[in-house]
Amino acid sequence: MTDDMITKLAGYIASEMLKQPGRAIAPDEALISSGLVDSFSLVDLALFIEDNYGVVIADTELNASVFDTLTQLADLIRSRM
């Protein structure tokens, strides 16, 4: 389930946020701390997660200390499902 989740999250970030649908994002690649995903995009990412997985990401969690990689993000989603 996590692999599918990571693939779906990576696809969303690459196509919708980066506008680079062919861009591969590794599960352990830094998203926020590297600047790949900016603070404005975090809200869109949280909404995508809520719509697709039915979990809530609080505004205070939209930072690199909570999820900076796809693996961390998938773990957070799974822990709330």
Image: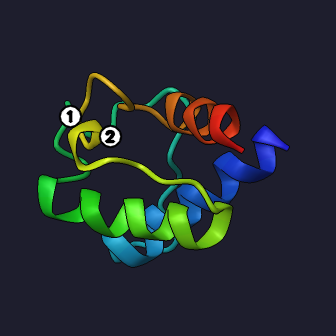
**Quadrant of the frame with the N terminus:** top right
Residue at image x 53%, y 61%? 49
- In the rendered structure, find residue 64 and report the number of the disc placed on it: none
The residue closer to the viewer here, 27 or 43, is 43
Tell me where residue 71 sits by quadrant: top right
Describe the element under mark 2 as helix, strand or loop: loop
Q: Residue furthest right?
A: 1
Measure how far apart labels 2 and 1 are at the Cα level: 6 Å
Give how far across and how far down residue 74 sits, in percent.
61, 38
Q: Which residue is mark 2?
A: 31
Q: Residue at x 16, y 53 (%)?
A: 38
For badge 1, the amino acid type reads: Ser
Q: How many marks?
A: 2
Asked which secondary structure carries label 1, the reply is loop
- Compared to residue 67, the image places residue 45 above or below, namely below
> For mark 1, what is the residue?
34
Crowding at dot 1, Cα within 10 Å, few <14 / some 14-19 / many 20+, comes out as few
- Percent x, y for residue 81? 72, 45
Picture coordinates of residue 23, whole percent (x, y): 47, 60
Q: Please tell me in which quadrant of the rendered image residue 78 appears.
A: top right
Q: Label 2 amino acid?
A: Leu
Residue 79 left/right relative to 4: left
Q: As drawn, is 4 to the left or to the right of 39?
A: right
Task: Say if 25 sits above or below 42 in the image.
Answer: above
**x and y, in percent, of residue 54 in the image:** 63, 62
The reply to whether discs 2 and 1 touch (Cβ–Cβ < 8 Å) is yes
Residue 25 higher or lower than 65, as above or below: below
Picture quadrant where residue 7 is located: bottom right
